[in-house]
Amino acid sequence: MFIKQVKKKNTKKGKSFYQYQLTQSSRINGKVKHIAILYLGSQPLLQNKENRKIVARMLQAKIYGQNDLFRDNYKPDQQLIDLAGQLYEKYKQTYKAANKEPTVKPSDNNLADYKEVDINSTTMESGKEIGAERLCWHMLERMDLDQLLKAKGWKQQAIDHAKIAIISRAIAGYSEHKTARWLKENTGLPDLFNKSPGQITRHHLYAAATGLYEIKQELESHLYTRCLNMFNVDDTLAIYDLTNTYFEGRKTESQLAKYGKSKEKRNDQKQIVLACVINAEGFIRHSEIYRGNMSDSSTLRDVVDGLQRYTPGSSTRQTVVMDAGIASEENIKMLQEHNLYYVCVSPSKLKDYKAQVEEEGPVTIKDKQDNELEVKMLDPKDKPDRWMYVRSSRKTLKETSMHEKLMQRFEQQLQQVEEGIHKKGGTKKIEKVWERIGRIKERNKSVHQYYDINVEHNGTHATRVNYTRKKQPEKNPEEEAGVYFIRTNYPTVEEKQLWNIYTTIRQVESTFRCLKTDLNLRPVYHQKDKYSKAHLFLALIAYQMVASIRYMTTKSGITHSWSNIVRIMNSQKLIEMSQNTKTGRIGFKQTTKPTNEALKIYKACNISSVSERLKKFVVYH
């Protein structure tokens, strides 16, 4: 029962005003209809939405002849209490003359089911998380995973286990062993598949992950095509980058786990390299898994060879965007041979670029953080492609600060050599002093060239170490700080346009951050390579689902990270409760109403916020 606000218009004066009526929603012949109970006029107090809710609750309690159990929660003021009393008197006078009452109480025709229960026996059996699970379940249904798996001969039970494994990976990110406990104790996910929590073991999850990896090529192509079709996104940019994730354990029999340069500074652990091709909206087109000691630049050929095979055919010439670590001369030549456009940061700098930049003058643009950049397109005579000069004031400040810190460290180490000459037991022999200085230069390759170093000696022993900064070094670090170059083979492109294309590589960084932080891609505990590959690939499938949800929420102005979306959605619970009756015990299972924040996410993803129907069970004595 609620108070409905009805907008009216004065036909003579043309002014709008509101009237109110007490209304009830009832299901009649399977359809929900609003039944007007009582006309309330244009009472000013009812203009406030909260006042309407309070008065409706008090009226409902009076009409039903019940005490308002939750009256203390909202504590109405005396004006609203008096208004509710006046309206109830009007209700009695209206229906006393007609000698009947309106249909305000649920009837048998509305599928009502009344039972006498012992309120004192009310027991909350459990409360499990269901909001994020329901969100992922709906999105996974839209991706038509069932269609592909059935075509591959999968049975429905195996399909359900696969979908549960994907959703669990997206929400919890646990190992298979811990996920099985989570499914049993913490989540209502099995209920969405009409399964008992104890039915799903870690062995089912292992089998699901390895089975999905066996159809990796078809599954990646299917999911990417579905994302393109659902959102009608651009498919011309292929952003390529690599990351690595480390292992826990010795991995003595693994062919993949190798020691290599770790991006996570975990050089003490063996690692594996994950390469991804991602489009401008963050959807994964293709992925490959390499040995942990594979260099970045040596992986691009494999991906380019399979780029057309793993993704839908396109008549548009595609563009590969990559960072400096992959943009070797060999790779750039290979991209040209494959008739692909490329945009990348050059690991080296142009010579004699200053004159051309100063002569024509740089163009000033702003990045997404509103920082100013100086950019200028250049056409070097000795290069087959076009280069863009970029100078960032923010990068200049950072590199200058880093350079100054390195110089201070270099000077401190030289000062330690000087102090050692005058200490008892310190290094004094001239050969040993120069040897020590040489090791310091080796450790500080980027800055020692800016110093003149002189060692005074008496023939056999050093007496003093002098060092001074060069007044006019061959390379001025301040002039070079913050300067880098972007290369491309686009025949015609403006500075702003090329910058926007290059900055799409930040989408890869966002993808890897989501995989590692939100989906717990690291570390890998599996000891066998096939399980390690399945573990990584399951996270990539889960990411496609997460990326689809975040794409829709971002379009609606909701910019939360995935972990924050899960937190908000987890406020919706699946509640089980039971009560005693005269003949037995009755139980209920239903989801709670979503919060306002959760409702916004449901709406952004075009998912109905109506909870699943009430599940009821009765146990008789």
Image: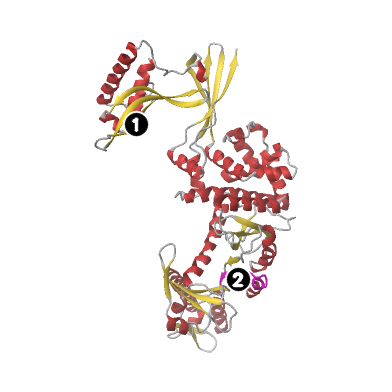
* Quarter of the figure with residue 34: top left
Which mark is nearer the camera, 1 or 2? Answer: 1
In the image, residue 135 sits, relative to residue 332, either above or below, namely above
Amino acid type, mark 1? Gln
| x, y percent for residue 151 | 73, 44
- Residue depicted at x 48% and y 51%: 554
Contact check, label 1 and label 2, Cβ < 8 Å: no
Mark 1: which secondary structure?
strand
Magenta span: 334-345
Number of marks present in the image shown: 2
* Residue 339 drawn in magenta: yes
For the N terminus, which image quadrant? Answer: top left
- Residue depicted at x 63% and y 69%: 340
| x, y percent for residue 521 | 60, 51
Task: List the single residue furthest toward the bottom.
Answer: 459
Location of mark 2 (residue): 327
In the image, residue 593 sits, relative to residue 36, either above or below, namely below
The residue nearer to you, when weighing 314 against 338, is: 314
The residue nearer to you, when weighing 471 against 243, is: 243
In the image, residue 416 sits, relative to residue 16, either above or below, namely below
The residue nearer to you, when weighing 578 against 248, is: 578
Amino acid type, mark 2? Ala
Task: List the single residue furthest toward the front.
Answer: 12
In the image, residue 26 sits, relative to residue 356, either above or below, namely above
Colour pattern = secondary structure
Alpha carbon separation for disc pair 1 and 2:
65 Å
Q: Which mark is residue 586?
A: none
The answer to whether one can see residue 174 in this image is: no
Upstream in the sequence, badge 1 or badge 2?
1
Location of mark 1 (residue): 5
| x, y percent for residue 31 | 50, 26
